[in-house]
Image: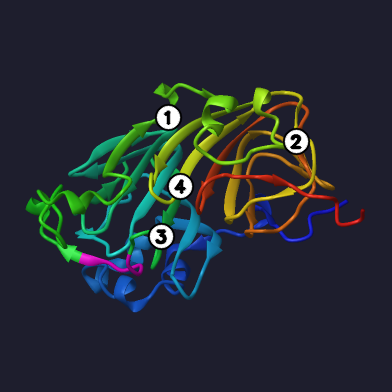
């Protein structure tokens, strides 16, 4: 039986968009504040991306981005939106924050001034929360270089500038312990139907009030959910390694899935094991449901 409600995208089949094509999908509050107009075209010739998710109402988005060696932002800047990233390869220096490499993660609340530059190139999953999750619309403000590491919107000494997840300049995911499925499930609500003995989790960031979170999920070989089921919130995932089977779909590295809330889908399994980057719009509760055909 196939997936009835989830959107599945094989990113290998998506064409790369040039940086200039990407900018056309952004609000004027972002694309009109990139820096000297006569330098924008040459700069974004080093930028390409594949859009995985875009909500035009909230401006929330998730992109697979590649920056060529030598790419550098034209100015220091900040955003009204939360910005989030997970590095798939390469490196990037974020002035005022940290130097990030493969498997590093960041979550930046609105207003924090930064500047990105990569000498060897970088590939990453890059998201803006848009008008959601304590975040404003996707926008860009040009800022002074000497203000890097400060907050343009709120006093950087004000605790509210950190939001609920904090200002995570660099989370080295490879240094995090994999939490056993049963331990992780204690805070998530019902996870009946999950194969908890074959699940482990590395939380990257989390809102403790709403459960909204970004995590790495590791499915051990032989992972198999026990029934059809549904989550009370939407969630998104990108397969980073290994493969999994979901309904009639076989998903390898680079496959993106958006699963709406309250939608019943077949059980997920992984014969060989998999590692998944996942974003959830709340607690990862999962309630077993009868198959739609029963």
Q: Main secondary structure of the magenta part?
A: loop
Q: Nearer the viewer, mark 4 or mark 1?
A: 4
- Look at the numbered discs 3 and 2 and tell me whether their residues touch, using CB distance below 8 Å: no
Q: Quadrant of residue 78?
A: bottom left
Q: Which residue is mark 3?
A: 129
Q: Is residue 145 above or below residue 251?
A: below
Q: Is residue 87 above or below residue 235?
A: above
Q: Which residue is mark 4?
A: 211
- Look at the numbered discs 4 and 3 and tell me whether their residues touch, using CB distance below 8 Å: no
Q: Is residue 145 left or right of residue 30?
A: left
Q: Nearer the viewer, mark 3 or mark 2?
A: 2
Which of the two residues, 27 or 171, is positioned nearer the viewer here? 171
- In percent of width and height, residue 31 lies at 33, 72
Task: Compute the Cα span from label 4 to label 2.
Answer: 22 Å
Residue at left 26%, top 58%?
Answer: 110
Q: Nearer the viewer, mark 1 or mark 2?
A: 2
In the image, farthest residue toward the bottom: 28
Element under disc 2: loop
Q: Nearer the viewer, mark 4 or mark 3?
A: 4
Q: Residues within 10 Å of mark 2 (few under 14, many from 20)?
A: many
Q: Which residue is mark 2?
A: 225
Element under disc 1: helix
Element under disc 4: loop
What is the image's colouring?
A: rainbow
Task: Compute the Cα span from label 3 to label 1.
Answer: 21 Å
Residue at left 52%, top 35%?
Answer: 216
Q: Quadrant of residue 253?
A: top right
The answer to whether residue 70 shows anywhere in this view is: no
Which numbered disc flags the more N-terminal residue, 4 or 3?
Answer: 3
- In percent of width and height, residue 176 lies at 42, 24
Which of the two residues, 7 or 267, is positioned nearer the viewer here? 267
Q: Which residue is mark 1?
A: 173
């Amino acid at each position: 039986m196939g997936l009835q409600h989830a959107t599945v995208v094989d990113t290998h089949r998506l064409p790369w968009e040039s940086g200039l094509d990407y900018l056309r999908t952004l609000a004027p509050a972002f694309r009109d504040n990139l820096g000297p107009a006569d330098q924008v075209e040459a700069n974004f010739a080093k930028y390409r991306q594949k859009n995985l998710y875009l909500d035009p109402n909230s401006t929330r988005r998730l992109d697979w981005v590649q920056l060529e060696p030598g790419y550098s932002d034209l100015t220091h800047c900040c955003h009204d939106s939360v910005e989030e990233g997970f590095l798939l390869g390469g490196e990037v220096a974020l002035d005022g924050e940290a130097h990030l490499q493969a498997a590093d993660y960041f979550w930046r609340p609105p207003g924090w001034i930064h500047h990105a530059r990569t000498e060897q190139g970088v590939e990453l999953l890059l998201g803006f929360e848009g008008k959601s999750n304590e975040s404003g619309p996707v926008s860009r403000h040009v800022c002074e270089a000497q203000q890097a590491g400060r907050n343009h919107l709120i006093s950087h000494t004000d605790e509210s500038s950190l939001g609920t997840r904090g200002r995570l300049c660099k989370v080295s995911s490879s240094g995090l312990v994999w939490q056993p499925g049963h331990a992780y499930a204690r805070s998530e609500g019902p996870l009946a139907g999950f194969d908890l003995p074959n699940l482990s989790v590395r939380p990257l960031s989390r809102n403790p009030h709403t459960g909204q979170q970004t995590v790495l999920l590791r499915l051990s070989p032989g992972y198999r959910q026990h029934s059809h089921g549904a989550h009370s919130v939407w969630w998104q995932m990108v397969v980073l390694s290994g493969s999994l089977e979901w309904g009639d779909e076989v998903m390898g590295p680079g496959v993106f899935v958006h699963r709406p809330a309250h939608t019943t889908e077949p059980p997920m399994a992984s014969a060989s094991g998999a590692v998944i980057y996942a974003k959830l719009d709340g607690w990862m509760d999962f309630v077993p449901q009868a198959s739609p055909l029963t």
